[in-house]
Image (cartoon, rainbow, N blue to C red):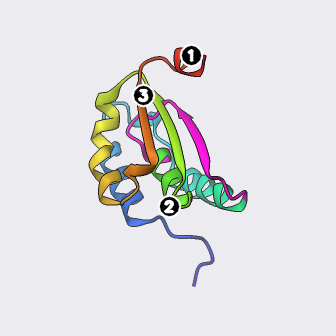
Amino acid sequence: TSVYPREPEPMKELREITAKHPWNIMTTSADEGQFLNMLLKLINAKNTMEIGVYTGYSLLATALALPEDGKILAMDINRENYELGLPVIQKAGVAHKIEFKEGPALPVLD
């Protein structure tokens, strides 16, 4: 048996959707997603920020790692790419943790 954590089914589904996208090179790898998930759990993260969401693979990894009352401020200039992954995020039951802002991150951070 492997001690390496398995990729959760919603993340696998979103990775497969993203692989069909013309800009799929921008996605986070499965290993990076698992590593991010583990780090967030180790530090007991509750609130995070993601600048550059793309289809939401690392966003989903983050949302799955956060506690039920955790929050993510997610920003991207392209809502269309985010909406490709949104059905998977909703199906995973973590959409309530995400506040998505469309546009450049700097004005939001200011």
Could you say where residue 27 lies in the image, as x and y percent from the top left? Answer: 46, 40
Q: Nearer the viewer, mark 1 or mark 2?
A: 2
User: Judging from the image, what secondary structure is the residue with disc 2 in?
Assistant: loop
Q: Report crowding for label 1: few under 14, some 14 to 19, many 20 or more residues within 10 A (C-alpha).
A: few
Residue 68, labelled with which disc? 2
Residue depicted at x 60% and y 46%: 47
Q: CA distance from mark 1 to mark 2?
A: 28 Å
Residue depicted at x 53% and y 14%: 107
Residue depicted at x 28% and y 29%: 80
| 80 sits left or right of 54 in the view | left
The number of numbered badges drawn on the structure is 3
Q: Quadrant of the C terminus?
A: top right
Residue indicated by mark 3: 101
Q: Report crowding for label 3: few under 14, some 14 to 19, many 20 or more residues within 10 A (C-alpha).
A: some
Could you say where residue 42 lies in the image, as x and y percent from the top left? Answer: 71, 61
Residue 79 falls inside the magenta stretch: no
- Give amino acid for label 1: Leu
- Give amino acid for label 2: Glu
| 99 sits left or right of 87 in the view | right
Chain part drawn in magenta: 43-58
Q: Is residue 36 above or below residue 98?
A: below
User: Judging from the image, what secondary structure is the residue with disc 1 in?
Assistant: helix
Kindly indicate whether the residue at mark 3 contacts the one at mark 2 (C-beta within 8 angstroms): no
Of residues 93 and 34, which is closer to you in this image?
93
Could you say where residue 34 lies in the image, as x and y percent from the top left? Answer: 57, 58
User: Judging from the image, what secondary structure is the residue with disc 3 in?
Assistant: strand
Q: Earlier in the sequence, mark 3 or mark 1?
A: 3
Residue indicated by mark 1: 106
Name the outermost residue toward the front. Answer: 69
